[in-house]
Amino acid sequence: MSDIEPPELPGDAGDHENNPMPGETPDAMDDLPPLMKKPEEENLMEPILSISGAAEAVLRQPRRIFNRIGESDGRSLALNLIFLSILGLLGYGFVVGTFTGGQQMWAAPVKVAGGVVASGLICLPSLYIFACLAGSRASLQQVIGLVAGLMTIMTFLLIGLAPVAWVFSQSTESVSMMGFLHLAFWIVAMYFAIGFFKSGFKVVVAQFDKGVAGVWVTVFVVVLLQMSTALRPIVGTSDTFLPTEKKFFIGHWFDNLEGEGGGRGSRSSY
């Protein structure tokens, strides 16, 4: 009887390689597909040195943008974001110009890109002053980076909506309809861009007053809308590259609604 060996159990040595002990079990995360693994927090602090990296971070890791705009690579990051904004705005402006054709094919891109960049530059000093008065320690470089990020998010969304705008530009002749369609797209783009901006200040400027942030956002939106009127026509036709008459943007919209002729050759323009 002493020569009889007991049968091996599932947890014995013979089955040890296929069924390791609990303490020897490999990390469960190793068995997950790469897309199911949570990104390491350290990735949020990695420098962003390329234009493609800046575009990827804006869309997928906005917090990484917030963490880097105050660092040594923050200046190049802001420049990359501005470059992306200008490039995208030129593309969207080209789509806007396809409605009328002719000189608007190059004039609309120049006006769209120039108007947005000019609006950012005009509102930049007030943002920095508001931040300082609210007790913020954010540097000018950080403020520039946030404004550049706001413009980039807005631009990416406009590029995403550009094919829709092109379809309507080729299938309608109503200047007013196209003007308000583009306005609706800008409102949608600004909504998400403002969310990016406010999230950025929660990270970059912990002491920033939400009320002050709201005031600045209102100022920026109004300046952007007035810039679209000051640089008219962007949609439609005109005898001059820039307008000869000064108008407030709301008054200009109502004037065009009242004078809409319904054709590409009408005097209505936005």
Image: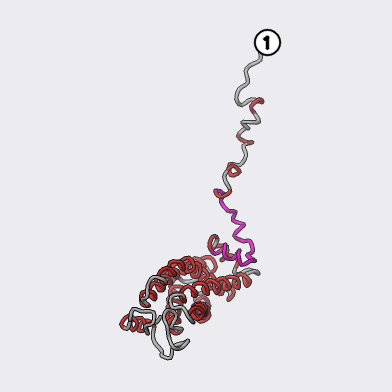
Question: Quick check: 164 above or below 247?
Answer: above
Q: How is the image coloured?
A: secondary structure
Question: Measuring 48% from the left and 80% from the top, which residue is drawn there?
Answer: 102
Residue in the foreground of this view, choosing between 226 and 204? 226
The quadrant in which residue 267 appears is bottom left
Q: Position of residue 226 (x, y in %)?
A: 43, 82
Looking at the image, which residue sits at the far top? 1
Q: Amino acid at mark 1?
A: Ser
* Residue 257 inside the magenta-drawn segment: no
Residue denoted by label 1:
2
Q: Is residue 234 visible?
A: yes
At horizontal 30% and vertical 82% (from top left) the residue drawn is 258
SS under mark 1 = loop
Q: Would residue 254 be found to the left or right of residue 2 on screen? A: left
Q: How many marks?
A: 1
Image check: 211 left or right of 63?
left
Residue 67 at x, y percent in the picture: 58, 65
Whether residue 129 is visible here, answered yes or no, is: no
The structure residue drawn at horizontal position 53% and vertical position 71%, both measured from the top left corner, is 88
Q: Is residue 39 magenta?
A: yes
In the depicted view, which residue is nearer to us: 207 or 259? 259
The quarter holding residue 224 reads bottom left
**Quarter of the figure that contains the C terminus:** bottom left
Q: Is residue 100 above or below residue 70?
A: below
Residue 192's spot in the image, x, y percent? 45, 66
Looking at the image, the residue that sits furthest to the left is: 258
- Specify the principal SS of the magenta part: helix
What are the residue bounds of the magenta stretch? 36-58
| Quadrant for the N terminus in the image | top right
| Residue 103, image x, y percentages | 49, 82
| Viewer-side residue, 217 vs 257 | 257
